[in-house]
Image (cartoon, grey):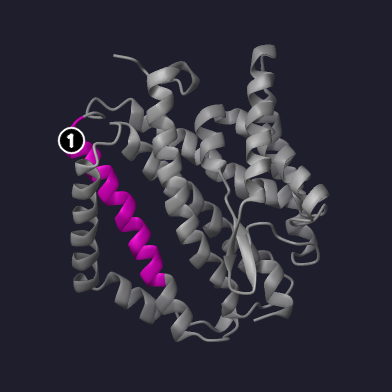
Amino acid sequence: MTGPCLPLWAVHISEGVLTGPWVTGGFVVAGLLALVGAWRVRDEEIPQIALLTAAFFVVSLIHVKAGPTSVHLLFNGLVGVVLGRRACLAIPLGVFLQAALFGHGGFSTLGINSCIMALPALLAWQMFTVLQRLPWVRRPWFRGGLVTVSVLVWEVSLIYMLVLLFSNPWQPVSKMDYSLALRITGHPLTLIVALLLSVLIAWGERRLENAPEFPIGLLVGVTAVLATVLLNCLVLIWGGQEDWPSLVFLVVLPHLFIAVVEGVVLGFTVGFLVKVKPELLGWMVP
């Protein structure tokens, strides 16, 4: 499991991995996103952008060992929730610093790596904006539903990836058989057990008496990480120079646990900020 697969075990794609059109397209899309992020930026927003850029960069120092390699926290969901479309400015700067100082990814893939991180950040921003405006945001049933959905999505992702990897050992991606993973994941018994476990965890979360806003942060944080890893895998499959072996999908497994950490952290962060500085999140105070 060493050799050419190791550079693929993170959401920073290394140099020489993608074809030229994808590298070029990454810079084009990243440039367009940066223009969207910079549109009508105000002077008072610049310190906030700088602070979140620094936080996004610093969390890359926190590594979690995963077999022969390691993964690090992403926090693009937090950047998206706090900065909104300004995340398209903060994330490319953070990705550049990570490449320049730590060798994460490469300079030729700065564009595509920025897109992989920035697009889920925008998704997190939109999800948070919609959810926090719903009239049932503080209702116990709605909060429990958000936790249930968060856990269920995580469980289904874990089951699917485990079955996919074990049923296709060392198979090239182009020859992988996805049918068994789809059948097992979509089996009624699998879904019922996963749903029951999700409801049980949601009940346990209610007993912990977390902030009412915690479930929103949990769902947004988990979704941002899963979306980031999904984009990373799709780019490798569609834009890779090689027909990678199935082990490149192992990048998903450690990031599933990163998703739990970031979901919990974002949940507590949202709950705290709503109490002390709701305007930072654009939270509608009743």
Q: Position of residue 230 (x, y in %)?
A: 52, 59
Instruction: Point out residue 119 in the picture as x, y percentages from the top left corner.
Output: 57, 43
Left or right of residue 93: residue 206? left
Q: Residue at x 44, y 85 (%)?
A: 167
Tell me if 188 is positioned left or right of 46 in this view.
left
Q: Main secondary structure of the magenta part?
A: helix
Q: What span is colored magenta in the figure?
A: 139-160
Vertical placement of 81 versus 259: above or below?
A: above
Question: Who's the residue at 51% across and 60% down the image?
Answer: 255
Q: In the displayed structure, would residue 157 be above or below residue 170?
A: above
Q: Rate crowding at label 1 as few (under 14), some (14 to 19) or many (20 or more) other CA atoms within 10 Å.
A: few
Q: What quarter of the picture does the N terminus occupy?
A: bottom right
Residue receiving disc 1: 140
The correct choice, above or below, for 152 with respect to 96 in the image is: below
In the image: residue 177, left or right of residue 96? left
Residue 81 % position (x, y): 49, 32
Q: How many marks?
A: 1
Residue 15, image quadrant: bottom right
Kindly state the secondary structure of the residue where label 1 is placed.
helix
User: Which of the 4 quarters of the picture holds residue 186?
Assistant: bottom left
At 78% from the left edge and 53% from the top edge, which residue is drawn?
A: 102
Residue type at mark 1 is Pro
Asked if residue 138 lies left or right of residue 19, the reply is left
- Give whichever of 173, 75 is nearer the camera: 75
Q: Position of residue 72 (x, y in %)?
A: 60, 55
Seen at 22% across and 61% down, the residue is 197
Q: Quadrant of the C terminus?
A: top left
Is 147 magenta? The answer is: yes
